[in-house]
Structures are given as C-alpha cells and as structure tokens.
Image (spheres, grey):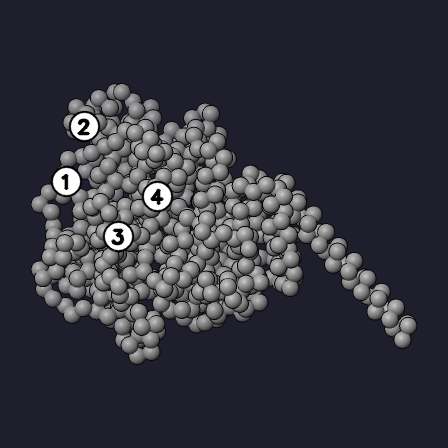
Amino acid sequence: MPIRRKLIAALSLATSALLAGTAYADTAAAKKWIDNEFQPSVLSKEAQMKEMEWFAKAAAPFKGMEINVLSETIPTHEYESKTLTKAFEEITGIKVNHQLLGEGEVVQAVQTQMQTKRNLYDAYINDSDLIGTHSRLQLAVNLTDWMAGEGKDVTNPDLDVDDFIGKSFTTGPDGKLYQLPDQQFANLYWYRKDWFDRPDLKERFKAKYGYELGVPVNWSAYEDIAEFFTNDVKEIDGVRVYGHMDYGKRAPDLGWRMTDAWLSMAGEGDKGLPNGRPVDEWGIRMEKDSCNPVGASVSRGGGTNGPAAVYAIRKWDEWLRQYAPPGAADYDFYQSLPALSQGNVAQQIFWYTAFTASMVAPKSEGNNTVDDSGKPLWRMAPSPHGPYWEEGQKLGYQDAGSWTLFKSTPVDRRKAAWLYAQFVVSKTVDTKKSHVGLTFIRNSTINGTSFTERAPKLGGLVEFYRSPDRVLWTPTGINVPDYPKLAQLWWQNIGEVNSGKSTPQQAMDQLANEMDDLMARMQAADEKAKVYGGCGPRLNPKKDPSEWIGKTGGSPKAKLANEKPQGETIVYEDLIKRWQK
C-alpha cells in the first residue's frame, strides 16, 4: 500500500506540474498576442489578460480538437482566417480551419446543412438577412437559450451582448437572439470630394442645373451629377471620368445587389424600422402582429412589381448603361467596388463601407483616391433616396455577417466553435480587428479613442457609425420566410433586364409571380408539417392590382406623375455637423 500511495502521489504531482505548465504556456501565449497584436483595445492589458485566461480555461476540455468554420471573403474574415486562428490555437489549443468562399457559396453551404442536417461546418458567419429563415425553421441554435443553458459553461461572462450594434438585426420575432454579429458594413454614398469642391466645376454645374454641386439628397440630384461628370466634364487631369459605378453581371451577386435594400432606397415598402411593415424592402407583405407572409405581387398586396420597385430597377439599368465606365455591366460585386481606386469615377450611389480598408490603402499601392499623405480625396455620405421614399422608411442596407450555430453540429464541436466565435468578437480583439477591416460591431469600439484619432483618414466612416442616422440602414428582416430559396429568384430575373430580354416591368412581374409560387409551396409544407413553425406564408387571394395599389396609405404605392422632382444636395460639412450632434 505505501508503494501504491507513493505512486499515486507521484502521478498527482506530475499531472499538477503538467497542468501548471500548460496554464503557463496559455498565459505566455496570451501575453504575447496582447502585447504584439491586440493593440489598441478598449480594455486595459490586465483586463485583456483576464478575458484570455477565461478562454484558455473554458477551452481546456476541447484542447487538441480541430474544427471547421466558414465565412465569405472580405478583409475582416481574411484577418480572422490568417491571424486570429493562430492566436486562438496558441491560447486555447483548439485548431480552427476558417475557410473563405464567395457569398453565394456560403449561402449554399448553409442551405445544404439545413436541408440535409449533416454537419458540413461547425459554425458559419452567415448574414443576418436569414433571421426570418432561422427563427422559423428552428434549425439554428437559439443563442439566448444556449447561453443560459447548454452553452453556459462556454459563454464568455464578459461577452456584453448589449454592446453589439447589430443585435436588433439578429433577433427573431420571438425576441430570441439567433446570431451574433461578427462584422457589419453599410451601403452608403461615395464621392470624390476633391472634384466636387473645385470652383470651376461647381460653377458649371450650378449654371446648368440651378442648384449647388454637393452631396445628393435625392436620386434626381444623383442622376444630374452622373450626367454632368460623364457627358459634360468628361476628363479631369488627363483621365476620362464617369459619373457612376455599379455592376450587372448575371450572377448571384446581382440578387444581393437588389435585395440589399435597393428597392427601399427608391421608396418601395412601408415605414418602419428595422424593416417596413406590413410591406418590406423585398415587397413581401406581412401584416403587423402576424408572422405569416401573405404575398409579394401587387395582386396579393405586395410591392415587388409595384411602380416604386419597377422605377428602382429601371434607374439601375439606365444609370449602368449611360453613366458607368465601359465594362461595368459585366462586373460582379467583387470587381466593381475596388475599381473605384483607379480614380476615374466621381460618385457611387451604392457603395459598401466594407471596402473602406482598400480605399485608404497608400498611393504607393496604386490607390489613386488618396493624397500623398494618405488622406482620402473621397468621402462617404448617406444614400440619396428615390421619389417614392418617405420619412420613417429605412434608407439603405447594412450587412451584419453573424455567427450562426446549427443543431446538426455535435454539441462538443458546437461548443468549441462558439468559443472561437466569441474570441474573434471579444473586446480584447475587436478594436484591432476593426482597424484592419473597418467593419464595426461594438459601440465601445466605435467610440474608443483610437478611432477618434483615426477618423480624419476614414472619409466619414467613424462619424456615420457614431451618428443616430445609422439605424436607417438595416439588413433583410423577418418578412422573408426562406432567404436562400427566395434570393436565388432575384438575380435570374433582374439579369434579364441587363441582357435586354425583359423590360423592368416584365422582370418584376415575373419575379413577383415566382416568389408567390414559391411561397405557396412553403405554405403547403408549413400547413402539412409546420416546416416553418406555423409562421410560413399564408397567401392572400389574388385580386385586381387596382384594388391594392395606392389604396392602403402605404405600399404598394401608386405611380407618381413626376418621378424626377427637383434635385437637392447638401454641403458635406453641414452633414458632418448634424452627425456630430
């Protein structure tokens, strides 16, 4: 017995030493990353260290595990994939394969995992546009209950969910959180302030249009400015210039281009935030105090093929043909936005702030939109609105790529993935990550001193995210019952306009009918087996469109006699003063 006791004691001491060594290694790794990478931070180094020690301890049961996560390809996720996975592995012992694919491929993978209930990935950074889908299908993990229950032991006590600016976008109609924002960016207006400020151009513009060249408030002014730079100015400093940039390649990107609130910018839809009710920016009608969509076509009370939506598609097509650089109609999302750095475009009405990082690259790297000191020659401003838009409507789109867990993922792998998800959005990491990708998710980061210092070099990004106006830019909402299935209908029909095979009215009529047909199938599945939890579509009977259009006090709105009112602009400095109030 004494020998056995001695052996047990020796093993106990060895185990304790091994655990102590592991803890020391974790601490050393955390200190290295905090000192060398995770600066600046809104936390002190002591608070950062405390948070990282929690991660190391919570991850202990999963050391040696290898997990797989998926996101789309943008600079923020590239930083996570290349840098933060290494930090996480060194601190926690969990290896993460963070794969990057195009947005359409991510949606396809999410859809496949939902349909097959096979674990393709252990977690996804999946747009909050799917909140209506996740809250209905109940295949995604309800994070509110997860954090309080099964996932409590791996939920960071300092996560501070209320600090996330996109929390309302990832909350279902049941009040539960289904996704956790990882990165966020808005589609705003972008323009060359240095050109707009030139006295000679200002004088020529006012002489022709009767008002000041400035930040356009409405689409009439945007169109006038596009015409002016493309056909009147034509050349600046020896470079052929254009008054507009967009893309039109017949691919899934074109669908996001439109479902990303283009119709609501024109004025389609009803008042209400974060999305119009009863008619949202997709044109889908869902009555207030209901979870059942009732139709997309005007004949069922929707707005997808109403005058405001048709106007929106017509303007997209006209501007792309008339005012954009040659070849833009064949660009996809990823080709069009970085093209601005060539320095030959005066403005862009639908520009994503996710590309701010590339637009502030130094001149030595081929960026022609910054000066020799690195300050931007451009600025961002609110999206101009179309003639159907009214105060109280959303004004644009805000992408909120958000961590999503699925019930089909084994619990141990789900817990390890949840730790990684929280790590890359933690206060320890978030400020540095935000400086890399400029895709803010936390109020504390936006309002931190490091971004006050950097703001002059970011063209209005910090001022926008600190302003109360930012709530007018929102993702797809809860009216959309099944995002992956409905979204794929958009690019195929809109693509027919760009190719010249359909008029905008024909394309939107076809789209609205296809959406209704698909929602009818969803309705049948929901009525039979509660596939959508009883919140699937319940389509209105078809009526003559005249019984709906212009009769509800909202959408579907009647066609305006004048779709081009007087152009209106604002002085950029006045805008900034308003934001800073």
Mark 3 = which residue? 272
Q: Amino acid at mark 3?
A: Gly
In the rendered structure, find residue 211 and report the number of the disc placed on it: 2
Query: In terms of depth relative to the viewer, which is nearer, 276 or 336?
Result: 276
Marks 2/4 in contact by CB < 8 Å: the verdict is no
The percent coordinates of residue 363 (x first, y second) are 46, 29
Earlier residue among tags 4 and 3: 3
CA separation in Å, label 2 and label 4: 27 Å
> What residue is rendered at 48% in x and 70% in y?
408
Q: Viewer-nearest of labels 2 and 3?
A: 3
Q: Which residue is mark 1?
A: 564
Q: Of label 3 and label 1, which has the lower sequence position?
A: 3
- Determine whether, in the image, residue 98 is placed left or right of residue 207: right
Report how far apart the C-alphas of labels 1 and 4 lie in the structure. 26 Å
Q: Residues within 10 Å of mark 1 (few under 14, many from 20)?
A: some
Residue 274 drawn at (x, y percent):
31, 52
The type of residue carrying mark 1 is: Lys
Work out whether 195 lies above or below 87.
above
Label 1: element kind: loop
Residue at which label 4 appears? 470
Mark 1 or mark 2: whose residue is earlier in sequence: 2
Camera sees residue 488: no
- Marks 4 and 3, how far apart in space? 14 Å
